[in-house]
Amino acid sequence: METKFKCIGECGQEFTAGNWECAPGIKHKVAPKTFYTLDAPTLDKNDVNGIAFRNARTTIENVPPERTIKDASTGELVKVPGGNVVFVRGTVTVEDAEKIYWLDKFGHGKVTKEEWLRVYFSPLEKQKMREIDIANKEKEIERKLQETNELLERTKAQVQKGKSAA
């Protein structure tokens, strides 16, 4: 199965692996994709916040891999070095179609955000995230309640206006 991408840049066309440019020297622009890795170090009993060692960086080398190409002007073979991708705290967002292709091909697109959250965050961080989520839900409920009350008041006013006109 051939991987297809959609350029959101210059050309706006669909393209496949190997066709990384809209035009010579102009790379296709694609929607960003976030990758996760489960490389979280274990918690250290001396780290009271539980995050110091989890702020690590992991570099994935050879994305895209090194390749040999033929120089158009000289006809000689030239080695193009491979790239790399740096995961910071177990995540990276990539906008380069070629890097997305190779990360997926090497299996880095298999970890879900939920798995990453479960493994990467300390119990204290998870608790804080739950508290933030609850506070956001409470604000949303309060906003909806206020909208409902305002709508009820407007409806009552219109009904009263209709009764007094009749």
Image: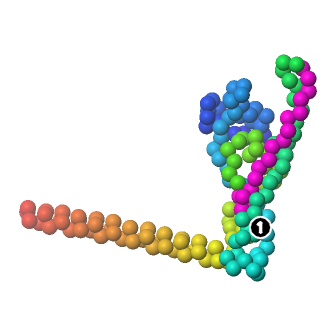
Residue 22: quadrant of the picture: top right
Residue 78 on the magenta span: yes
> For residue 139: magenta?
no
Label 1's element? loop
The answer to whether residue 77 is above or below residue 114 is above
Q: In the displayed structure, would residue 87 be above or below residue 52?
A: above
- Image point 64% across, 77% down: which residue? 124
Q: Closest to the observer: 125 or 165?
A: 125
Q: Which residue ends up furthest to the right in the rendered image?
A: 77
| Vertical order, 127 against 114 (above or below) | below
Q: Report the residue that reaches farthest toward the front.
A: 46
Percent coordinates x, y for residue 70 in the rendering: 88, 25
In the displayed structure image, the side of residue 68 where residue 59 appears, left or right: left
Q: Is residue 36 visible?
A: no
Point out the stretch of residues depicted in magenta.
Answer: 75-91
Work out whether residue 30 can be spotted: yes
**Dot 1 corresponds to which residue?**
40
Residue lying at 75% horizontally and 63% vertically, measured from the top left: 56
The answer to whether residue 106 is left or right of residue 20 is right
Residue at 49 percent across and 69 percent down: it is: 136
Residue 125 versus residue 75 in the image, above or below: below
Q: Nearer the viewer, residue 75 or 16?
A: 75
Amino acid on which disc 1 is placed: Ala
